[in-house]
Image: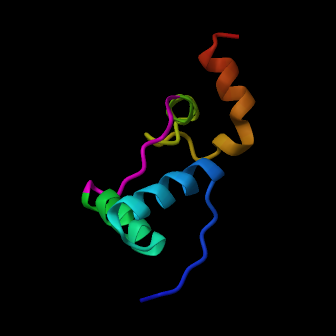
């Protein structure tokens, strides 16, 4: 096994702690099982609706011009018809 250090939000830690207690396993084992479950579901993280909208707007997810970082204002003006 590889040792790693992870920081959780307090609510996340409490949920994991309760799960481990209920299953009578260590917190580390609970985290491993949760990671395995996530990986077995395809291992891809879903973007929040807001992040997905921003990625679509930027053209990041579907390509876009190579100079978008430099000319983003010009492209936005073109898309908005200014």
41 left or right of 1 in image: left
Q: The C terminus appears in which quarter of the rendering?
A: top right
Identify which residue is drawn at 33% across, 63% down.
Answer: 23
Q: Residue at x 64, y 19 (%)?
A: 78
Q: Is residue 7 magenta?
A: no
The residue depicted at 64 percent of the width and 64 percent of the height is: 7
Looking at the rendered structure, the number of numbered marks drawn on it comes to 0
Front residue (pair 29, 24):
24
Instruction: Please state if 9 lies on the left or on the right of 18 as rendered.
Output: right
Q: Is residue 73 toward the left or the right of residue 6 in the image?
A: right
Q: Is residue 77 above or below residue 9?
A: above
Q: Which residues are magenta?
A: 41-49
Q: Is residue 45 magenta?
A: yes
Instruction: Name the residue furthest bottom.
Output: 1
Q: In the rendering, at what x and y percent does residue 27 appear?
A: 47, 70
Residue in the image at 43% along x and 74% along y? 26
Nearest to the observer: residue 35 or residue 12: 12
Q: Position of residue 57 (x, y in %)?
A: 56, 28
């Amino acid at each position: 096994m590889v040792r790693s250090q992870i920081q959780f939000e307090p609510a996340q830690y409490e949920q994991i702690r309760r799960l481990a207690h209920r299953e009578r396993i260590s917190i580390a084992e609970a985290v491993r099982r949760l990671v395995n479950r996530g990986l077995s579901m395809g291992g891809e993280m879903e973007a929040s609706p807001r992040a997905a909208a921003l990625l679509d707007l930027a053209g990041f997810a579907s390509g876009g011009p190579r100079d978008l970082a430099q000319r983003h204002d010009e492209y936005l003006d073109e898309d908005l018809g200014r």
